[in-house]
């Protein structure tokens, strides 16, 4: 039995788990805003020049399948983070589901896009960071299982 499973869980585990929860809760907020966006809510962003009208139309035309995958990725990551805090081994499986949701969402969103030039480059950077963070959380949760920290 390892030191961690016998007693005290290291403070860094809680810090990483709480940061992950904050990260994925922000993702859930982004998911919620994407589902509730309307032409009226995007109009001020178009008017101020934050986004183009073409990009606003792209956002509004997002298929339901992309939105479902977005929800799967963000809600899955949030649940996985909660599982980390509860020290449950299911965290790793939920992070894997979250990553697959994100990958499929980005493939549908960008892989079959008609004109990727309308998408701001920051979207591609965000997509990369999301997938890297989730992949790292899979590795982290797997390591925590091996160390006996996730043992429930």
Image (tube, rainbow, N blue to C red):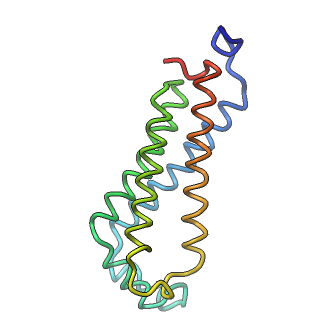
Residue 144 falls in which quadrant of the image? top right
Percent x, y of residue 34:
39, 67
Q: Is residue 52 left or right of residue 9?
A: left
Percent x, y of residue 139:
61, 39
Residue drawn at x 57%, y 50% as measured from the top left? 23
Q: Measured along the vertical axis of the image, is residue 17 above or below residue 55?
A: above
Residue drawn at x 55%, y 56% as measured from the top left? 131
Q: Measured along the vertical axis of the image, is residue 93 above or below residue 40?
A: above
Residue 3 falls in which quadrant of the image? top right
Percent x, y of residue 142:
58, 32
Residue drawn at x 72%, y 32% as measured from the top left? 12
Q: Measured along the vertical axis of the image, is residue 84 above or below residue 72?
A: above
Q: How many marks?
A: 0
Percent x, y of residue 78:
47, 43
Q: Considering depth in this image, is 72 or 60 the residue closer to the camera?
A: 72
Q: Quadrant of the N terminus?
A: top right
Q: Measured along the vertical axis of the image, is residue 9 above or below residue 142?
A: above
Q: Considering depth in this image, is 140 or 10 the residue closer to the camera?
A: 140
The residue at the far left in this view is 64
Residue drawn at x 33%, y 67% as measured from the top left? 36
């Amino acid at each position: 039995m390892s030191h961690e499973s016998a007693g005290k869980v290291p403070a860094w585990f809680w810090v990483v788990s709480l940061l992950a929860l904050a990260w994925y809760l922000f993702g859930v907020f982004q998911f919620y805003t994407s589902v509730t966006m309307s032409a009226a809510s995007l109009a001020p962003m178009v008017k101020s020049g934050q986004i183009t009208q073409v990009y606003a139309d792209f956002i509004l035309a997002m298929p339901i399948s992309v939105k479902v995958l977005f929800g799967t990725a963000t809600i899955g990551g949030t649940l996985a983070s909660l599982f980390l805090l509860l020290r449950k081994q299911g965290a790793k499986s939920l992070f894997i589901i979250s990553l697959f949701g994100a990958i499929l969402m980005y493939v549908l969103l960008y892989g079959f896009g008609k004109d990727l030039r309308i998408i701001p480059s920051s979207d591609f950077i965000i997509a990369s960071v999301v997938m890297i963070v989730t992949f790292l959380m899979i590795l982290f949760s797997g390591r925590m299982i091996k160390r006996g920290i996730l043992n429930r």
